[in-house]
Image (tube, coloured by chain):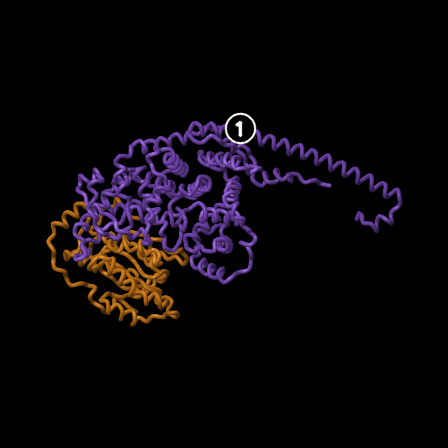
Amino acid sequence: MDLNKETLHKLDLSRLSAIVFQLQSDIGKASRQLVHCLVEKDEKLRLLAEKEDRVTLLLINYASQNGLDTNLNFKISAPSSFSESAYKKWLQAWAVVSRIKRGIPKPFRKRVWNVITTHSIRSLNINFAVLFREDRSAKDQEWLRLINKVSSSKLKSKYVTCKSVERILLAYSRHNLSAEFTSELFILSSLILKITQGNELIAVKVLICLMDIMLPPAYFTQELRTLHVELVVLNDLLSYFFPKLSSHLHQLQAANSSRVCKSYSSSHPPTFKDSLAFEPPLTNIFVLRWFLNMFTNTLSWKALRRLFDAVIVCGADMFLYAAVSIWGAFEKELLAVDNVSDYYEKVEELEDRLKNTKLLSSTEFIQMVYCAHEIAQSNPEIPSIDELRHKNTPLSPQPVAVQKISCPSPSQDELIQLDSTKVTKTLELNIVTSPSQAVIAAKAECPQTIKKTYLYANAYAADIPNDVLALYSLNISEPHFNMLREGTLYTIDM
Amino acid sequence: MARATDKKYDHLFQLLLCGDSSVGKTCLISRFADNEFRHTHINTIGIDFKLKLFTIRDKKIRMQIWDTAGQERYETLTAQYYRKAQGIILVYDITREETFRNVTKWLRNIEDHGVKGVKIILIGNKVDLESERKISTRHGQKLANQHNIKFFETSAWKDINVTEAFTELAEQILAKVESGGGRDRGSSSIRESAIKLHEQQPTPATKSHGGCCSGGSSN
């Protein structure tokens, strides 16, 4: 019955009493149901807190066994107070989870990414409604034109449509007014959208966080100056982590280039015969492709998702450690290659095997990345990435890629020893810089233990207590958890 | 795909494709190496390469084909690889005038960064889009004649003249190599080859096949 004022006026007293009685009965029933649900909710939250505490203990145990920071507190949702210390403990817990064998469980990925990126960009006071507005300015139209120019089927999925990529790229361009559109930005946006399963708000937060906070400034600009520095930094890191491979690649490059070095001068330009002999630094072509494509052409989908977890949780340096790890995975086979032509084909073959997880599993690969990160953090002999970037960033406006460098032309014995004192003959070649000579010199002194630790670290990382997998037994799906948290798990039927 | 361990070939040739963005360089390579054509693909980023085993005059040729990105921002990077190439294919799009105008710029890049005597051919791609043609065959041929290089008009989509263009370039390189202008690598290591090269006496350059300007097979 529709109980409005007019209807009620027409009813007699007994009828009205019956209605009042029925209403009081329904309210009482609903109240009891509500109390029951709230008690049940509290009980479930208590159980959840217990399980979270149990996971916290397991994670602390795992962290302490593996030399990681144990100051952590595992919670599925973001800490309510959001004090800096509570956040740090929450983040460290997820950093440890991301490192364990199975990584961040899929139902929690978006939640974790959302909390971290929201925290990182909180001081920017971004109005997302403005970023996602429907009207289009002239600048928006220009971005749309460029987006459609590079639009590719390569990254499309049920979560990644042209329209959704357009929306998040426009939102990013409205946030960062000086941003330049590049195909790499398109690839990165599509990839983030795919990992966040089409959640555009989280995708934009991740994009802003990566481009404006985590990655070095001007990472994907037209000039690629920053990426050229990253190539040199990577080569430096490689010489610390895999000195044998680094030295071998230099030998291959130098063996090819030395002949040209000896015969080059301004009066004798390179000849047809030299075409097979000139050699840019061997890792550059591949590493640049990995960075520009955000590893989409090199890693399996699972490894890629986990690498992005690592980046979001631990920082963008993880991209460099991923590159170091790929070379580590290639080392054994590349050491058997004795000439440059075969080298290029071999790396292509190895990339293919890595992508298809025929070289090593996604889990093994990601463990290598974490080990590289931890070794770099704990070993004082390895300079920090910031130091390496600073050292290799040219002061002059001239791009790094064309700065004039020393080109060694060592003898066979010298090549084996790679004695830095011999690396003094210079030749002005406009080539992308190879690892700085200081690093080549330093790597001779770099203890082999770094590499051994790296390999053994991989072994211990795989040995994870099964109890940590209790995390997966929480059996709470994300929508389920949202309802639980918001108290809407049970609908009250009046 | 041929692997690095395959050693059964007589010569290793390194080819490079250059030209403006979106003229069809990657599609030409895909057509030649894999007989494939993709209507949609993302612009080449940086530099890529493909391998093709190929037989000319009973000689097994292993071709490493370097595919450079046409965008200006990659020029610093791609310029490094010009010096590795024995043959360069310069591509423009017959439907886009500016890509033809830029041929001169690309030729200058080759001159600046490539090796002396590198074999070059000019390709006007996308002849399947005849109705949108902006550059006539005569204009393409004239420019090729001016620079004393061979000229082809191709369609990677319809598979017109693609193999012919690559074959012509390989023939020119082979002729140069066999006349002593280049080096036969075969299965020997770079180091061994390098030693051999130092021992070689300079030989007079033979008449270049590329000197003929009659146009490979312009339509």
Q: In this rendering, would A231 be left or right of B9?
A: right
Residue B23, image quadrant: bottom left
Q: Residue furthest front?
A: A395
Q: Residue A25's spot in the image, x, y percent?
A: 79, 37
> Front-most of A178 and A361?
A178
Expressed as whole percent of the image width and height from the top left, the position of residue B205 reads 14, 60
Q: What hue does chain B carry in this figure?
A: orange
**Residue at image point 40% right, 31% down:** A461
Q: Residue furthest left?
A: B201
The front one of B125 and A420 is: A420
Q: Quadrant of the C terminus of chain B?
A: bottom left
Q: Is residue A477 above or below residue A257?
A: above
- Give coordinates of residue A153: x percent, y percent: 44, 54
Q: Is residue B75 above or below residue A251?
A: below
Chain letter for purple, please. A
- Evaluate whether residue B195 shows in this view: yes
Q: Work out whether A95 lies above or below B201.
A: above
Disc 1 is attached to a residue of which chain?
A: A
Q: Nearer the viewer, residue B100 or A247?
A: A247
Residue A74 is left or right of residue A252, and the answer is right
For label 1, the SS is helix
Q: Amino acid at mark 1?
A: Arg
| Residue B42, picture quadrant | bottom left
Residue A386 position within the rendered picture, expressed as x and y whole percent measured from the top left: 37, 42
Q: Name the residue tied to disc 1.
A: A54
